[in-house]
Amino acid sequence: MLLDWLADPSTDRGLRLRGTDGWHFHSYRDLAADVHRVSATLRAAGAERGDVVSLVLADPWTFIASFWGTIAAGMIPSPLATPLAFRKADRYIAHLASVFGVARPAVVLTDAVLGEQVDAGAARSGIPGTIRRLDLTRPADPAEAAFEAPAAPVGPDELALLQFTSGSTGTPKGVRVTWSALNANVRAIRDWLGWTDQDTFASWLPLYHDMGLIGGMITPIASGTDLWLMTPDQFIRSPLTWLECFGRHGVTLTTAPSFGYAYTARRVTPAEIADFDFSAWRVAILGAERIEPAAISDFYHLAGPRNFDAGALIGAYGLAEVTLAATGVRPGAGSRLVRTKSTALSVGEEVVVAETARLGLDAVRGAGWMTGCGTALDGLSVAVIDDDGQPLPDGAFGEIRLTGSSLAHGYLLAGGELAPFGPDGLRTGDSGFQLAGELYVVGRIGESMKVRGASVHAEDLEVELAELPDLAKVRCAVAFGFLDAAHYAVVFVEEDVTPQWLTAATERVRTLTAGAAEPLVLRGRRGAIARTSSGKPRRRVMWTELVKGPETDWAVLHGEPPAGLHTA
């Protein structure tokens, strides 16, 4: 299914990539030519069918051609993050070394931009694989230009992709996605969205992350859809350019985390889109992180007057372990919001809904508001379970478990160890509940703390802090930790905060944790908060760095850190 487009690539449809001087069109025929060049390069490097090929590439076109070229050669692509998510060169090189050590690639494809860092990471990991720097701008050699049919299809249980998790809770793991799982998830996404030949897609998400890779690149190309692509840094510089895809060029589909819509609402003014028409924009998926209802309301009130339908805003839930998408709200239906009576929930407890609202239409604020993420996609099943793995009834709080045809085979760990998922499916480590079969995701279990038997989630505390005055220009993250027989709620902030905010923040921490956690507020420079490739705070990683050292750059603004905690 995924390689069908290569048999007769279109000259009329293809990719539009954003350059410094505007959009540049590349047909599927153009892409096919470079796909075959990459396949020839891999064979010349000695790679064989079934080998892992790590992709560490800055240029979107080169990445896309390399991904499909690896698949067409019968090999297993393993996309890796660029340095943007790591801030520091040493941290990025250490990440590459760790991932290379797990993947043990036969070939690493990179480019002139990232080549030196790839060399350093490979040397540190000691991998025997070959490193190839690609330059698809030079004329192709005769051997590269020769058209070759894709490798014969592999069995459904063979690996199609080695997708590393974003690492929000620690060291990234290699998710072993089979051909059957990948094909099943692409089909499920197309069915969920009612995808047609008239649809077009736009994305600014990083191509190495599962949401950008499978949702924003693999599914559109496998469908032969016109695809408009920006890079994350291009989006940050100009979210207006992203909106132009829909308001001027009639693009119909997209996906992004809540942050993307919120950022757009902050940066774009109504005057700048006065002549836009969003009437063709029928799907705006929200996933990858907790959805912020207030921020999405700001986005709707920016785009709504230009014929944007609030029903296009659809919540979704997924993760790399289930290839990508697990649940989703149907397009046009709009996403339901519920406010739970309490944000401290116990496993097995029935969730009491205090209020309801609609995503986009209602500007609700504060903790306790949850966005519906829809029902299970075709071929998948969702259950909420207790600590013993037993299913809980509709409306009860517990851990989310997934089963079905899109589920990966398990993890690849260091030393080649395989960690398959159990026969009962995947315990996601995420908490939530279902109401009338619709899933509501509360947060990561490993990033919560128990207060009088109930779970208080870091995400809820972050939402509460976001409502305090003076925080509009301050970025923060919360991590719970236990050290020297005491619980701590560490609030990481970037740059300065006012004394008024500091007092209000520490009072809010004490209130929400019922005094069980000692507030500790630490300040770092802009960009100090460690984030995953999808932008989520690496809360447990930051806590571990504080405990294990070496000395960090975090300065204490409030609280008494215990002895041994590594602060500036």
Image: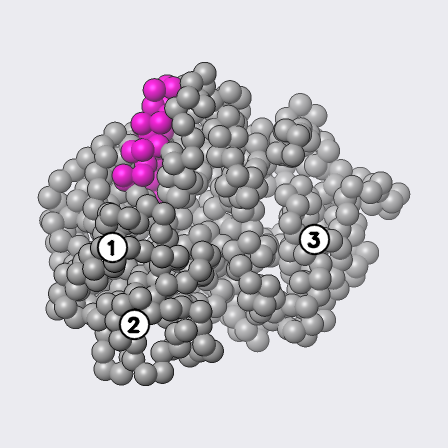
Residue lying furthest right: 142
Query: Is residue 224 in view?
Result: no
Q: Nearer the viewer, residue 321 or 301?
A: 301
- Indicate left or right for 65 with 518 as reference: right
Answer whether labels 3 and 2 touch (C-beta < 8 Å): no
Q: Amino acid at mark 1?
A: Trp
Q: What residue is at 35 percent from the left and 51 percent from the top? A: 474
Which of the 4 image quarters holds residue 353? top left
Mark sitting on residue 108: none
Is residue 412 inside the magenta stretch?
A: no
Q: What residue is at 31 percent from the left and 27 percent from the top? A: 301
User: Tag 2's secondary structure?
Assistant: strand
CA gap, disc 3 and disc 2: 38 Å
User: Tag 1's secondary structure?
Assistant: helix
Residue located beneath label 1 in the image? 501
Q: Amino acid at mark 2?
A: Gly
Looking at the rendering, the stretch of residues picked out in magenta corresponds to: 293-317
Residue located beneath label 2 in the image? 481
- Indicate left or right for 334 with 171 as reference: left
Main SS of the magenta segment?
A: helix
Q: Nearer the viewer, mark 1 or mark 2?
A: 1
- Indicate left or right for 195 with 131 as reference: left
CA gap, disc 3 and disc 1: 42 Å
* Quadrant housing the N terminus: top right
Residue lying furthest front: 499
Q: Nearer the viewer, residue 321 or 241?
A: 241
